[in-house]
Image (spheres, rainbow, N blue to C red):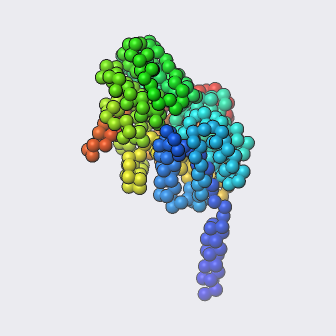
């Protein structure tokens, strides 16, 4: 009887110690208001879904998420990062949508010895010479989806393309990526202010240039307005429109409406990918939130799964930077997109697909895979990253 009591006491002590252990703290800095809010909301919701399905724990450690709305403003993102590191003691920051915000936050994160797991922003500056041991991107490098579409437009024989993007790091990376695989003529290359919503003047210039194809990168509210205005100007029927997934993502398709129907876009993920992990994710997301998940939601979900795998492998030493960095590099999780591994610069090597905007059986606009464009594709900057 005494032995049973001793064992029981030890078990109670173990449970009490686990309950009393410090939680894993995640700083969720993302855009939750304004025209780009849909992107941040989907990243947050995807992350939270994974956390809920794991019982509120990542790697077996009770996890607290500290949330902040960056309002798509670099100074606010930096303020949030400083507060979360100094006051809340977060171990990891994630959620940032925009590349200019990611670049602004990096110095604060590095000074605080905090890992930044990007669920979206993938600027070229952090992929090459400025790569950083505290930065991991679980989504893509900014150029990648655009590179895939450059290959598609090249394969289809277009030789006079017109290119448009917002004037910020991801916009410049986008067109650089497209031109890396598209070698035809350029009828025009236009950069518009970030957040611009009226494209009447630009569409008039586009029409006058008489291209045989148009490639645009406009995420969030910018994409909604551009695609609708493109059709309203009578251009959709005359000049094929192409873009990356961000301009035809699930979070904006309902607002764009039939103007997006039939448009091709490229992505590393699609809701109809037939992996067991993806099918489970899509079903759980629809049940929980009542909507089809977007690319951003899938990336938020995978960010949580990456952290879960790394913390689990690190065990009770997850707060040791060297150990957690090594387990993050392993990327030992089942991604919703299938095969996934990190390159030497902590950016993904993964497949990319051509998708088409369609209506499903319920009449809801969504994307379906047409074909694979790239198999296990890396980025163009890894060779200039000096990390061992």
Residue 90 vertical placement versus 152 (above, below): below
In percent of width and height, residue 255 lies at: 38, 39
Residue found 63% across the figure and 42% down from its top: 77
Q: Is residue 9 left or right of residue 256?
A: right
Residue 226 image-quadrant placement: top left
Residue found 35% across the figure and 32% down from its top: 260
Quarter the N terminus occupies:
bottom right
Q: Is residue 222 left or right of residue 260?
A: right
In percent of width and height, residue 144 lies at: 50, 29
| Residue 84 in sight | yes
Q: What number of labels is visible?
A: 0
Q: Is residue 136 left or right of residue 47?
A: right
Q: Nearer the viewer, residue 359 or 376?
A: 359
Residue found 60% across the figure and 38% down from its top: 73
In percent of width and height, residue 163 lies at: 46, 20
Q: Nearer the viewer, residue 50 or 71?
A: 71
Residue found 64% across the figure and 71% down from its top: 16
């Amino acid at each position: 009887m005494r032995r049973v009591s001793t064992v029981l006491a030890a078990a109670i002590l173990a449970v009490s110690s686990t309950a009393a252990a410090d939680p894993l703290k995640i700083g969720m800095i993302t855009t939750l208001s304004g025209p780009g809010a849909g992107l941040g909301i989907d990243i947050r919701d995807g992350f939270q879904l994974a956390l809920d399905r794991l019982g509120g724990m990542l790697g077996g450690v009770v996890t607290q998420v500290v949330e902040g709305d960056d309002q798509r403003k670099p100074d606010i993102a930096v303020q949030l990062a400083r507060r979360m590191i100094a006051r809340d003691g977060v171990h990891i920051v994630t959620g940032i949508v925009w590349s200019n915000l990611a670049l602004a936050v990096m110095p604060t994160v590095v000074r605080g010895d905090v890992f930044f797991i990007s669920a979206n922003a993938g600027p070229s500056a952090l992929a090459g010479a400025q790569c950083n041991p505290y930065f991991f991107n679980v989504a893509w490098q900014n150029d990648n989806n655009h590179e895939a579409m450059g290959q598609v437009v090249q394969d289809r024989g277009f030789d006079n393309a017109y290119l448009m993007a917002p004037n910020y790091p991801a916009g410049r990376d986008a067109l650089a990526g497209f031109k890396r695989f598209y070698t035809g003529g350029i009828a025009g290359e236009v950069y518009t202010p970030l957040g611009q919503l009226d494209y009447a003047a630009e569409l008039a210039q586009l029409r006058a240039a008489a291209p045989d194809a148009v490639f645009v990168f406009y995420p969030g509210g910018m994409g909604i307005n551009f695609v609708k205005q493109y059709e309203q100007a009578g251009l959709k029927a005359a000049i094929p429109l192409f873009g990356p997934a961000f301009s035809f993502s699930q979070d904006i398709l309902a607002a764009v409406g039939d103007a997006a129907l039939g448009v091709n876009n490229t992505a590393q993920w699609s809701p109809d990918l037939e992996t067991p992990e993806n099918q489970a994710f899509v079903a759980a997301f629809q049940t929980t939130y009542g909507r089809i998940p977007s690319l951003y939601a899938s990336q938020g979900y995978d960010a949580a799964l990456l952290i879960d795998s790394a913390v689990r492998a690190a065990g009770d030493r997850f707060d040791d930077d060297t150990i957690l960095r090594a387990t993050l590099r392993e990327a030992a999780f089942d991604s919703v997109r299938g095969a996934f591994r990190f390159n030497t610069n902590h950016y993904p090597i993964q497949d990319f697909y051509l998708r088409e905007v369609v209506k499903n059986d319920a009449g809801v606009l969504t994307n379906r895979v047409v074909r694979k464009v790239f198999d296990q594709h890396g980025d163009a900057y890894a060779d200039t990253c000096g990390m061992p």
